[in-house]
Amino acid sequence: MFCHKCGTEVSEESSFCHKCGAKLSFYGGQATVPAELSQQW
């Protein structure tokens, strides 16, 4: 899964991104990814 703020790959057990420190949010077992980040992949 990926951080919703910076797009860094993070483990599913993480509560915070190890790169930017953002709190990770889960909806239906997946982190949310803003449209502008999802278009980069």
Image (cartoon, rainbow, N blue to C red):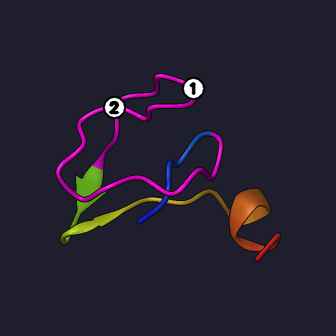
Q: Nearer the viewer, residue 28 or 6?
A: 6
Residue 40 falls in image quadrant:
bottom right
Q: Is residue 19 magenta?
A: yes
Q: Nearer the viewer, residue 36 or 11?
A: 11
Give percent across and percent down for residue 24. 34, 40
- Which segment did they paint magenta? 6-25
Q: Quadrant of the C terminus?
A: bottom right
Which amino acid lies under the numbered mark 2 shown in the image of this protein? Phe
Residue 36 falls in image quadrant:
bottom right
Q: Answer above or below: position of 23 versus 27.
A: above
What secondary structure predominates along the stretch shown in magenta?
loop
Q: Is residue 31 left or right of residue 5?
A: left
Residue at which label 1 appears: 20
> What residue is drawn where x is 49% and y is 59%?
2
Residue at which label 2 appears: 16
Give percent across and percent down for residue 27. 25, 62
Which amino acid lies under the numbered mark 1 shown in the image of this protein? Cys
Give percent across and percent down for residue 13. 17, 51
Q: Is residue 2 magenta?
A: no
- Residue furthest to the top in view is 21
Residue 30 falls in image quadrant:
bottom left
Q: For numbered disc 1, what is the local secondary structure?
A: loop
Q: Quadrant of the N terminus?
A: bottom left
